[in-house]
Every structure is written in structure tokens, then in C-alpha cells.
Image (tube, grey):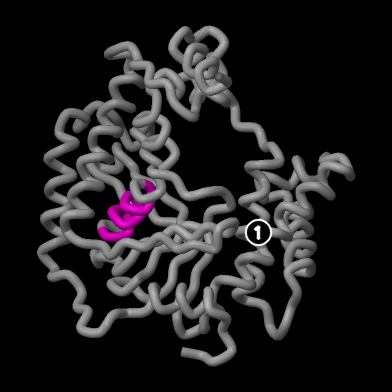
Amino acid sequence: MPDDLNPIQHEVLAALRVPDGWEPLEGGVVARTEQLLVDELAPVKGLFTADDPLWISKHALTTVHGCERHHVEQAKESFSWNVNTVKGTIVHKAVELYLNWPGSVTPAELVDEAVTAIAQNPRERASDFLDQLPAADMAQLRGAVLAAVTNYVDTFPPLKKQWRPLVEYPAYYSLFSDSVVFSTRMDLVIGAPGRRVIIDLKTGRLTSTHRDDLRFYALVETLKSRQVPRLVASFSLDASRLDEEQVSEDILQAAVRRTARGAIAIAQLRSGEREPTVRPGPQCRWCPVSADCAEGSAHLEELAG
């Protein structure tokens, strides 16, 4: 390992490196994983079309497995940017610039360049929001982004170009004549297909759902590239902590079952086949109908003591 890395960077690099004796999973894993997904999704086959597909994303699975009523009500709301959501976008842009920057650069320079790149590009969804953000809010946002980017630079090991790092890497896969579509966008991907490491960069704390998110990424990447990624990991920029998991056939099968359960629930709720169930949880804090939800209100009162 390089001698100029600090102890945390050494630790992260050791966790990400290919272990001695590692071998990729045999080719039959991909076919069995795909067939299991086809079998599990049989109830939705023929219900959608390529023109109006069932769209399955990490966010959709997280919300429907959390609280179905929140999932339904949130889908009715048009997306609007706020300081918290745009923070992650700027951090990811700064990391992308850092990985491709020729020569040395400071975290503050990366943040300024990232903000400018997003604000001045009309194709960036957050450009209007940043353009209209009051100066005081922009200063506060810049400070929060700077802390996250500084933590990344200080604690995540530098990535060599031959490791083929990719930021905001999209992956898509579809079934049943493009009538069911699985969509992901991965924060950071390292390596070639079949040896890839998929990393989620988290600006907040790691939660129990993060591994589910990563397993969904691994599933889509497996089906898209026809090769199984080697490792998935979440890296907390606040805690400088890596939580990694080697991808196995059991993990892919667990991802298939969770994805299929979520997709079937999304299909049922979208068609109005049944009423959504209510499961109080962290999402109650930002649910648009929490004030009118008895279970959600009781949960928030309990949290408030």
C-alpha cells in the first residue's frame, strides 16, 4: 500500500482490495438470478407496457417497504429541491471533479467548482434552485458540503485511473418487453465488470436500509452486465466509516425477493387493487399526510416524549 496514506485511508483501501484467492462467481449465478426474478414477478407480467412501464428504483423500494401510504402520498407530490437534497448532489459533483482533476486541488476549490458547474448548467436539475438560493443559505450549504468533501479527501484513499472509477454511474435493466424497468444511479463504481466495487457515499449516518440499497445496486449491475460485482459498500462521510459486503448468490437472491415484493406492492397500489398499509417510522417526520394520519401522529408524539 502507498506510504503517504493516513491510517483511515489504509483501512478503507485494505477493505476494498481484492482478497487473496478471490474468484468471481460462476456464470450460472446470473442465469439463476434472472430466472428467479422472472418467476417472482410473474404476478405483474402483462399488466404494464413499454409505453407505460412499472418503474422500479431504489427510492421506490425504500418507500414502499417503509410505509405504503407514505409511498402513495409522496408520489402525488412534485419533487422540490431543498438544502438537504441538493447537498448530496454537490458533494457527488465535487467527488467527480476530484477524481478527474489534473494536479492538486483543495476541497474548497472543489466545492466552488461543483456549485458553479451545477448552477450554470441548465441541464442540471438543481441549477434553478441554486441560482435562487439566498446568500445566507448558500453560505450555510457551502459549509456543509465543504465538511463532507474535506472528509472524503482526508479519509477515502485516492483512486488510480487504472481502477476505472466512475461517479453517478447509471444502470438499467428491464423485463417483459421493457414493461418493467429497474433503474439505479450508483455514487461511485470502481473496477471492470465482474470485479466491480459499488460504493454509496453517505452524507448522514448509516442505517439498516443501506445494505438493502446496495444489494439492489448489485442485482441491477449483475443483470445489466451479466457479471456479478465483487463488493458493495457504504461509506459515511461524517463518520469516516466503511460498511462493506461481498456479493454472493445468496445476497443476490435476497435482493430479488425484496425487489419482487416491492414491485408487486407498487403495482397493486398504482392500480388501486388494494388500500396502502400504514407502517409508522422515520418517514413520518416528512410525510405530507402525517397530520391526518392517526398512526403517524401517535408515532411522532411518542418520539417527542
Q: Residue 216 location in percent, x, y?
A: 33, 49
* Label 1 crowd (10 A; few <14 / some 14-19 / many >=20): many
Asked if the stretch drawn in magenta spans residue 214, the answer is yes
Residue type at mark 1 is: Ala
Image-based side of 147 in relation to 185, left or right? right
Image-based side of 213 in relation to 292, left or right? left
Q: Where 146 sits versus 81, above or below?
A: below
Asked if the stretch drawn in magenta spans residue 199, the answer is no
Quadrant (top left, top right, bottom left, bottom right) of the C terminus = top right
Q: Residue 143 location in percent, x, y?
A: 77, 54
- Mark 1 secondary-structure assignment: helix
Q: Where 139 sits versus 60, above or below?
A: below
Q: Residue 5 location in percent, x, y?
A: 56, 84
Residue extending furthest right?
135
Image-based side of 297 in relation to 216, left or right? right
Compare residues 15 and 50 and report the one nearer the observer: 15
Image-based side of 297 in relation to 225, left or right? right
Q: Residue 29 location in percent, x, y?
A: 14, 61
Residue extending furthest bottom?
3
Residue 193, quarter of the rendered image? bottom left
Span shown in magenta: 213-222
Q: Where 295 sits versus 117, above or below?
A: above
Compare residues 288 and 209 and report the one nearer the observer: 209
Residue extending furthest front?
305
Residue at x 56% of width, y 25% of height: 285
Q: What kind of secondary structure does the magenta stretch mostly adopt? A: helix
- Where does label 1 land, which residue? 148
Q: Where 300 sits versus 204, above or below?
A: above
